[in-house]
């Protein structure tokens, strides 16, 4: 399998997953993993997540933007890891883009709630695994 095939198969895996594991680095240098909803992405390059501004992982990304995403299909023994940088955003357009009915349960002040934030992940590298093959690639 070449890198182009790995990217395409990884993108297919992303499209089949409603959830993703998101990795951050805490203040003591330890990795932390959190499950999040796969809300929106642009290919394999950019991913958007909604979260609480006050959450622990937002603090991790503010202190150290290095991050990873991991998509997995356990039944097919298939995985995709993306590594890159995560930033916490308060951009009103991004917040509106991710807003949907039901969000007010978590953000009672609505889309302008100061505890409502968007995390934007920008991938730099990827690694696709399937069929006992690992293919590493850059994300252009």
Image (cartoon, rainbow, N blue to C red):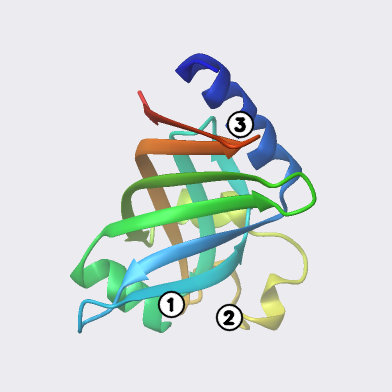
Q: Residue at x 45, y 38 (%)?
A: 127
N-term-proximal mark, 1 vs 2: 2
Task: Confirm or deny contact between disc 1 and disc 2 (CB under 8 A).
Answer: yes
Q: Position of residue 86 (x, y in %)?
A: 34, 55
Residue located farthest toward the front when viewing the structure as drawn = 132
Question: In terms of secondary structure, where does tag 1 sit?
Answer: loop
Depicted 133 relative to depicted 69: above or below? above
N-term-proximal mark, 2 vs 3: 3
Q: Nearer the viewer, residue 32 or 87?
A: 32
Quadrant (top left, top right, bottom left, bottom right) of the N terminus? top right
Answer with left or right where residue 15 lies relative to residue 45.
right
As drawn, the label of residue 109 is: 2
Question: In terms of secondary structure, where does tag 2 sit?
Answer: loop
Task: Confirm or deny contact between disc 2 and disc 3 (CB under 8 A).
Answer: no
Marks 1/2: CA–CA distance = 8 Å
Answer with left or right where residue 77 lies relative to residue 61.
right
- Give the residue at mark 3: 11
Quadrant (top left, top right, bottom left, bottom right) of the C terminus? top left
């Amino acid at each position: 399998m070449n890198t182009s095939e790995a990217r395409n198969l990884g993108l297919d895996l992303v499209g089949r997953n409603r959830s993703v594991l998101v990795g951050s680095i805490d203040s003591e240098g330890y990795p932390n993993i959190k499950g999040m909803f796969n809300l929106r992405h642009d290919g394999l390059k950019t991913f958007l997540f909604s979260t609480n501004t006050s959450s622990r992982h937002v603090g991790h990304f503010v202190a150290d933007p290095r991050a990873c995403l991991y998509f997995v299909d356990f039944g097919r023994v298939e995985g995709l890891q993306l590594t890159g940088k995560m930033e916490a955003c308060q951009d009103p357009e991004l917040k509106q883009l991710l807003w949907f009915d039901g969000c007010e349960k978590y953000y009672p002040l609505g889309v302008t709630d100061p505890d409502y934030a968007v995390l934007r992940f920008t991938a730099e590298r990827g690694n696709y695994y399937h069929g006992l093959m690992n293919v590493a690639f850059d994300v252009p």
